[in-house]
Image (cartoon, grey):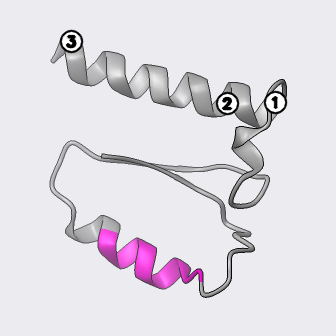
Amino acid sequence: MLLLVAPDDEMRNANSAVVKQAFALMPHPKRWHDIEGGHFGLLYHPGARFDEAVAVQTAFLKEQLDA
């Protein structure tokens, strides 16, 4: 499980404590990655956040598929 988490999530009712608790309960393999830009900031292509999200997702998938 890979979570790309926006520390400044602007979504109504977003609750970082709930997300952290849910992540703690998830089985491995799992990874948490903080990403700036708000809830949808990583979706805008081209852009630095989009490139970051792609790199993190690609690395995680490679790790899991090679395992």
Residue drawn at x 53%, y 30% is 56
Estimate how packed mark 2 is, as few (under 14), some (14 to 19) or many (20 or more) residues with alpha carbons within 10 Å. Answer: some
Q: What residue does disc 1 label?
A: 48
Q: What residue does disc 2 label?
A: 52
Q: Residue 14's quadrant in the figure? A: bottom right
| Magenta region, residue range | 14-22
Left or right: 34 in relation to 24: right
Secondary element type, mark 3: helix
Is residue 18 inside the magenta stretch? yes
Estimate how packed mark 1 is, as few (under 14), some (14 to 19) or many (20 or more) residues with alpha carbons within 10 Å. Answer: some
Q: What residue does disc 3 label?
A: 66
Which residue of the protein is positioned furthest toward the right in this rendering? 47
Query: Which amino acid type corresponds to the residue marked 2 in the rendered image?
Result: Glu
Q: Main secondary structure of the magenta part?
A: helix
Instruction: Say which of 31 and 4 sits in front.
Output: 4
Q: Where residue 64 sits: x, y (%)? A: 24, 24
Tell me, for residue 34, which label it has, or none.
none
Secondary element type, mark 1: helix
The Cα atoms of the two marked residues, 1 and 2, are separated by: 6 Å
The Cα atoms of the two marked residues, 3 and 1, are separated by: 27 Å
